[in-house]
């Protein structure tokens, strides 16, 4: 089953949105980097993005059947959403939480993540490379 790379609100704006924080690469660039890394790792991968919390919950619920693991950048819902935490716990799949920016260097409201307790690990501050590191981690977790 493919690994799901799931992006939350405003990540469709990547490349245009506050490039000094999030960089100039677009979400399409992230997807092609992930596809290349997944190929190298022998992983199948699929992508989804939504600005809507309930759509993200629906996608995580579907992942329980359709996917073997999740890489998730929940955007601002990271800092607000018990629903995403519950969905990830219910999915019973290995999940890696990714943030492009170092959320601990930023406003204090970004320092807390509701979803981290459902993640195997968290990667923050390494830009788009974080997604590739997350795929590497999942490849190892799924191989054992
Ligand atoms: C983010 C960090 C969040 O605080 C922010 O709301 C985002 C992106 C990141 O990738 O650095 O939308 O998850």
Image (tube, grey):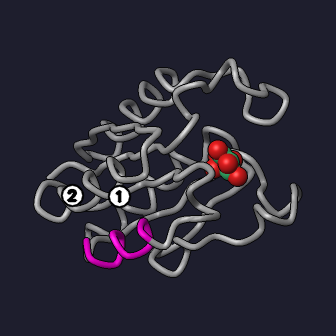
Which residue is under mark 1? 70
> How far across and how far down the image is residue 104, in percent?
82, 63
Tag nearer the camera, 1 or 2: 2
Label 1 CA crowd tier, 10 Å (few <14, some 14–19, many 20+): many
Which residue is under mark 2? 63
Q: Residue 132 got which mark?
A: none
The C terminus is located in which quarter?
A: bottom left
Dominant secondary structure, magenta:
helix
Disc on the earlier residue, 1 or 2: 2
Asked whether, in this view, residue 29 is left or right of residue 20, the answer is left
Residue in the picture at 47% in, 39% down: 51
> How far across and how far down the image is residue 106, in percent?
87, 55
Q: Secondary structure at mark 1?
A: strand
Q: How many marks?
A: 2
Specify the quadrant of the image occupied by residue 129: top right
Does residue 58 sit above or below 79 in this rendering? above
Q: Secondary structure at mark 2?
A: helix
Label 2 CA crowd tier, 10 Å (few <14, some 14–19, many 20+): many
Specify the quadrant of the image occupied by residue 80: bottom right
Write down the region rendered in magenta: 83-91
Residue in the picture at 42% in, 54% down: 71
Does residue 69 sit above or below 118 in this rendering? above
Residue in the picture at 58% in, 61% down: 78
Residue in the picture at 49% in, 55% down: 134
Contact flag, marks 1 and 2 (Cβ < 8 Å): yes
Asked whether, in this view, residue 123 is left or right of residue 43, the answer is right
Nearer the observer, 118 or 61: 61
Q: Is residue 86 magenta?
A: yes
């Amino acid at each position: 089953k493919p690994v799901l790379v799931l992006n939350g609100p405003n990540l469709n704006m990547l490349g245009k949105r506050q490039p000094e924080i999030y960089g100039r690469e677009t979400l399409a660039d992230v997807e092609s980097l992930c596809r290349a890394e997944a190929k190298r790792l022998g992983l199948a991968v699929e992508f989804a993005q939504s600005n809507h919390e309930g759509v993200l919950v629906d996608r995580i619920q579907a992942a329980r059947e359709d996917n073997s693991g999740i890489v998730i950048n929940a955007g601002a819902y990271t800092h607000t959403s018990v629903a995403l935490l519950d969905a990830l716990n219910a999915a019973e799949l290995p999940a890696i939480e990714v943030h492009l920016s170092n959320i601990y260097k930023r406003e204090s409201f970004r320092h807390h993540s509701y979803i981290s307790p459902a993640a195997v690990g968290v990667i923050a501050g390494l830009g788009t490379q974080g997604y590739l590191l997350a795929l590497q981690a999942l490849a190892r977790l799924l191989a054992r």
